[in-house]
Image: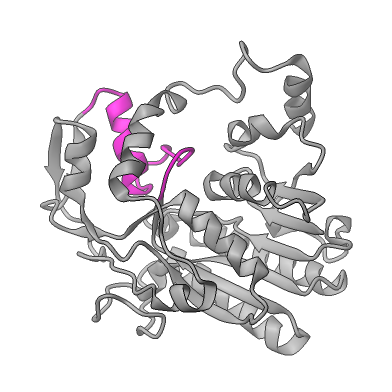
Amino acid sequence: MKVIVTGGAGFIGSHLVDRLLKDKKIKSIVILDILKAGKRNINHLSKNKKVYVYKKDVAKINKNDKCFKNADCVFHLAAIADIVPSITDPSDYYSTNVTGTINILEAMRHNNVKNIVYAASSSCYGIPKNYPTTENEKIQLKFPYALTKYIAEETIIHWAEVYKIKFISLRLFNVFGLRSRTSGAYGAVMGVFLKQKLSNKPLTIVGNGNQTRDFINVKDVVEAFYKSMKLKNKNHIINIGSSRPIKVKKLARMISNKYTFVPKRPGEPDKSHANINKAKKILDWSPKVTFENGVKELLKNIHFWKNAPLWDKKSITKATKKWFEQLG
């Protein structure tokens, strides 16, 4: 069995590759990634003969790309994230998130690949009226990021109908865990807080901190991806969250005793709370990692983020270093 993971060097993608490697039926895993910042996430895979890494931009992938030949499933996670910067550079988001998805679908079509699992976003709900929020909630696209992720989801559904491709679209809520990105001023709150702690700066809590987020550990998320691949009854949109909202100020206090408050940004929801009944029923999936244990693991391994090089010169072999240098 051969699978492809776009964005496989990223935060969630690298964890997904780790999970897929546990399945002995999977003989090869192809990572397609632009490799701007995720190399260190796949350091440990350099000697694994099942893993093949190709430096590729999904916005430029050709429909006849040979990487897709004989593939059984594509996990499509490659995307530009962060909500606020999408207002400044919407065309970049459209190019990667929408055109990139079309390119992936066309490469699948021309190589007769029939299964795709997509990393969609709960940002499509905007500021929901109903909590916990189900997959049937009204779509409110507040920012270009949400728009592009949702258009990509709709495109996958359309390709599935026209070209008989089977899909699962997982609408992810607030994913956190080891290897999460700390770059960018408007990234996920967990990454921003970790970066501030490492810099010995007060954590900046947006608003009064009473807003809640549905944090879900990356280990649970990749299990949902894996179960989606195995599912025989496809073509579903499914929420993936913990269904246990946590106050932002509680998170801040778990990480540091130094924090300050900044004005709330317009368009941000006061609450996120996933209804995960569909995931439980269809995927036979439910979260296993508690929020508290997940944060403890982050803090225990916080050295991972501190001035982390692309490879650890003390522990990585020359062969591994050469492997990354060849990737560019």
Q: Is residue 190 magenta?
A: yes
Camera-nearest residue between 143 and 236: 236
- Furthest toward the top, the residue is 314
Q: Quadrant of residue 213?
A: bottom left
Which percent across, then down, holds residue 75? Answer: 66, 61
Indicate left or right for 97 with 201 as reference: right
Residue span colored magenta: 176-201
The image's colour scheme reads: one colour
Which percent across, then down, holds residue 64? Answer: 88, 64
Q: Is residue 198 above or below residue 159?
A: above
Residue drawn at 60 percent across, 68 percent down: 228
> Which quadrant of the rendered structure holds the C terminus?
top right
Q: Is residue 150 visible?
A: yes
> Which quadrant of the rendered structure holds the N terminus?
bottom right
Q: Is residue 305 magenta?
A: no
Which percent across, then down, holds residue 189? Answer: 31, 47
Q: Quadrant of residue 231?
A: bottom right
Camera-nearest residue between 169 and 138: 169
Indicate left or right for 41 with 316 as reference: left
Indicate left or right for 251 with 149 as reference: left
Indicate left or right for 247 with 61 as reference: left
Q: Is residue 315 above or below residue 8?
A: above
Residue drawn at 39 percent across, 67 percent down: 123
Which percent across, then down, holds residue 43? Answer: 65, 30
